[in-house]
Amino acid sequence: MKLVLDQDVREGTIRVDLAWELFFGSKSSLPEGHGARLIPFTNWLWDELGRKAGFLNKSAGKELTLAIPALGQDGLDFLVRIASFWAEEVHVKKAGVVSENLWKKPVVNLFDDKTLDGSEKALIRKDNTEDSYQRFLMPLLGPGRAFFRVEALKNGETPARFHSHSHVDEYYLILDGSGTLRYNDKEVPVKRGDLIGKPAGPDAASQLIADRGEPLRLLDMEIWHDRAQLSKDLVRNPDHNEMFIRGPGWSGLFPAEAFQSSDDLWKHYNEGYRRTLDGGWVPSKNRGHKKMRENTQ
């Protein structure tokens, strides 16, 4: 199949131009600095292409057109990357002129931060210096369940809080330098080539710190149980004494002390009461619960 990215709107095209403005609030520019802003848009485009393209889709035609806005090079590079997963030919059409095949390989280089196309450059978020930055790789590699980013840290920096996930498997590969891994109550030295595992399940909190007198460069890999950032996830931050809930329909936090044992719940499951903020309870005539819990405090 051949995919054509056309700046002229015609009937029967996938209206990327409208979606671009809807998701990004812009008619032409690609959001800079954080790949997470691209994920909802890419999920939408991925599903649209899945309905009309695909190598095993026998209903697909020989050519499919996507109506696109007048984009800069970074936006075009990004759309060509996503389209290239679905077809062996990807062309851009401007003022009636069709380009050569612009198909892009599904490859990024973790060590080369200089020779990047426009979409790769747009997904770099720099901190205060050239030596401290995050390079987001998703969704340049497709909008699957994985979320990857390269992080370069100066000595004394950390890429994230001391934290755990309930619904994300997380792995770190040390690409260069050395540092310290905090893993629950233990501290472990790490160096180039070390692959660190933190699967969801045991609620293990971890943090990497560049604290050994040299920069630290790592690949942060998250594997979600659904497409990245569509799952609901409970994040624990022991240093900050916070529990953070995130995901579709979730966004809030509460102090870790508010997290209580569930034994009391099951013991009094069929009784009528309402839990209070301090962990106590007051009687309540809940529908379907005839027995009232007696206050013995």
Image (spheres, grey):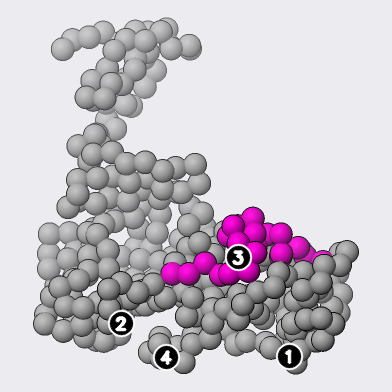
Is 5 situated left or right of 148 in this image? right
Q: Residue at x 54, y 78 (%)?
A: 119
Nearer the observer: mark 4 or 3; the answer is 4
Q: Which mark is residue 42?
A: 3
Q: Residue at x 58, y 60 (%)?
A: 24
Q: Which mark is residue 114?
A: 4
Q: Which mark is residue 130?
A: 2
Query: Which quarter of the figure has residue 283?
Result: top left
Which range is magenta? 13-33
Closer to the camera in the image, 14 or 185: 14
Q: How many marks?
A: 4
Tag 3 or tag 2, which sits nearer the N-term? 3
**Residue 238 to residue 135: above or below:** above
Q: Residue at x 48, y 57 (%)?
A: 229
Tag 1 or tag 3, which sits nearer the N-term? 3
Under mark 1, the amino acid is Asn
Give the residue number, with chain letter if any, for mark 1: 101
